[in-house]
Every structure is written in C-alpha cells, then in structure tokens.
Amino acid sequence: MVRDAEAAKRVTCSTPSSKVTRATVPLLLTWCAGKVFKVVDDRSSTPPRVEAFASFGGLLMLLKGEVTALKDLEVDMRLYILIRRI
C-alpha cells in the first residue's frame, strides 16, 4: 500500500477518495496500471503452461497458468489490478 505522496507519484495508482487519513488507510482500494515485460511459453510441459511477468512501478507480478487462460497476454500490454488492504 502506498502511503506517502512521493511514492504515489512513482506508481500510477488511484484511490476512491482524494482525502486520505490514518482512519481511512485500512479501507482503501487502490488500482495500479502496469505492463507485461516478459512472456514465457512452455508448450513442452503437460499441460502446456505460460508464465507472464508484469511490472507495476516496482511491484512485480508473475502469472502462471494454462495456455488457454493466458494466451492473449503480449509483451508491452497494459494490465490493471485492483488492490484492497485487508
């Protein structure tokens, strides 16, 4: 969760409220925009698998799955995630 203003500027994120206080931090929903920077296609495994690596301004994500689920992901494609603090 991004808490200071400088870190928020480095990551493309948005919060539902412009007024953030210590009381509202645990309830925040944040969305972040990122890009896929690497896709590894392993069709030799059983079942065929795909790994996609994405970066959200320093927050890295690895997606692993079957080819049918991740076949549309390409390098430089934009991804959006919604993060909720629990």
Image (tube, rainbow, N blue to C red):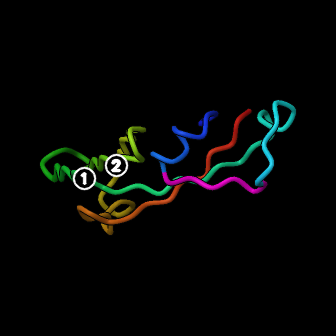
Instruction: Report the amino acid beneath label 1.
Output: Phe
Q: Residue furthest front?
A: 6
The answer to the question of whether label 1 and label 2 lie on touching residues, with beta carbons closer than 8 A, is yes
Q: What x and y, as percent, mark residue 11?
A: 48, 47
Residue sitting at x 69%, y 53%: 15
Residue indicated by mark 2: 54
Crowding at dot 1, Cα within 10 Å, few <14 / some 14-19 / many 20+, comes out as: some
Residue sitting at x 26%, y 65%: 74
Give the label on residue 85, or none: none
Quarter of the figure with residue 27 = top right
Instruction: Report the amino acid beneath label 2.
Output: Ala
| Sequence-first tag of 1 and 2 | 1
- Residue at disc 1, secondary structure: strand
Q: What x and y, as percent, mark residue 58?
A: 38, 38
Relative side of 80 to 38, left or right: right
Decide which of 67, 78 is in the foreground and name it: 78
Residue sitting at x 59%, y 36%: 2
Q: What range is drawn magenta here?
A: 12-17
Decide which of 42, 11 is in the foreground and name it: 11
Residue indicated by mark 1: 37
Q: What x and y, as percent, mark residue 57?
A: 40, 45
Decide which of 30, 69 is in the foreground and name it: 30
Q: Is residue 51 magenta?
A: no
On screen, residue 69 above or below 28? below
Classify the position of the N terminus by image quarter: top right
For marks 1 and 2, give the CA distance. 6 Å
